Amino acid sequence: MQKQIILLFVLMLVFSNTSVSQTNSNPFIVVLDAGHGGKDPGRPTDFGYKEKDIALDIVLKIGNNLEKIEDIKVIYTRDKDVFIELRQRAKIANKADADLFVSVHCNAHNSQAYGTETYVLGLHRNDSNFRVAKLENEVIFLEDNFETNYEGFDPESPESLIGLTLMQEDYLDQSILLARYVQDNFTYKLKRKNRGVKQAGFWVLHNTYMPSILIETGFITNKSEGDYLNSQKGKISISKSISDAILNYKSKLNSDSLLETKALPNKLVEETEQKNKNISVAEIQPNSSKLIFKVQISAGPNRLSTKSYNFNGLSQISRQKLDSIYRYFYGNTSKYSIALELLKKAISKGYKTAYIVAYSDGEMITINEALKSATN
């Protein structure tokens, strides 16, 4: 009998370890989307550049960089010069249950505009953003049965964009984080002009069910920038900046445990809410420590009052603006243990994608860096 019990215990350990191994071995899936292709060359230029070719070359180089990482799986919406419908691009990402969707394009303008900009889904905030989205969305007119497939969506109409933001709201913050990393790499590593992280109504971003960004790597209508984008040096540098941003995002995701906080058990939420009733206001007031933890609960284009009625009854709300996006934080503490309690309370109030952020001397750092620098 004792031997049977020991054997059963061993088998339980084996199956338990196998289960954990399988869970931890799930790859981080990145879908790379080279804009345009086939009968859709992209924006015309006077210099002979083809956006579809430049975008494809950059995407393949990004993929090559990422495929060297053991736990990353790369999927391409196209890996050659073929025409892919917008809805098919989104379908590829959704079917793969991807962790990220990254679409690569080149910008165009009737002036000598230059610089990089990265978009997340949202209502256009100005005419320039609407213009970029409109040009990218117009590819649907090249597709068969587009009237049926896109249910009356009109790229020419601002009103058609209003409904596009709803599906991506849950992923907006993560999309902004990745977009920021991309733009920072372009700006500080490649010394490119930073035109910012922006929101606009791109159909392909609307229909993907994961954090998604669209990168305008530069203007092929600008001779100098077009030469750079079309060169091997330019493509290698741009692709490395984007792949490094993806790796940085992945690292940040792991360190902040964003994925682990999306679905806490109801019992844990109830217990946490009860515990948080005992947390005094003084504990979440700003303090003299250089190291600060906050809980980011939401982000978006609208500037809201930080009153509790705007945040499901949560008080101690602060607001920060980055480019055209406002980020909202709950709490302010030097103790990571208290930050965890605040996170659980935020989740119990409906902010299922909330997560902890850390600042040192006013600069954002990773949670791992913060925990190494203080005893919490």
Image: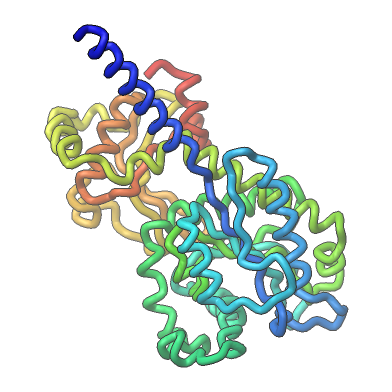
Number of marks in picture: 0
Would residue 186 be visible to someone looking at this image? no
Which residue is at a point 42% across and 90% down the rendered structure image? 152
On the image, which quarter does residue 305 sit in? bottom left
Decide if residue 169 is on the left or right side of residue 271. Answer: right
The spot of residue 262 in percent (x, y) is 32, 46
Tell me the quarter of the image containing the C terminus.
top left
The spot of residue 165 in percent (x, y) is 40, 70
The spot of residue 193 in percent (x, y) is 72, 59
Out of 95 and 370, give the one closest to the viewer.
95
Which residue is at a point 61% across and 82% down the rendered structure image? 135
Would residue 23 be visible to someone looking at this image? yes
Which residue is at a point 60% across and 83% down the rendered structure image? 139
Tell me the quarter of the image containing the N terminus.
top left
Out of 221 and 234, give the one closest to the viewer.
234
Decide if residue 152 is on the left or right side of residue 179. Answer: left
Residue lying furthest top in this view? 2
Out of 255 and 280, give the one closest to the viewer.
255
Out of 221 and 99, give the one closest to the viewer.
99
The spot of residue 335 in percent (x, y) is 34, 24
Colour theme: rainbow
Residue 331 vertical position relative to residue 38 in the rendered view, above or below: above
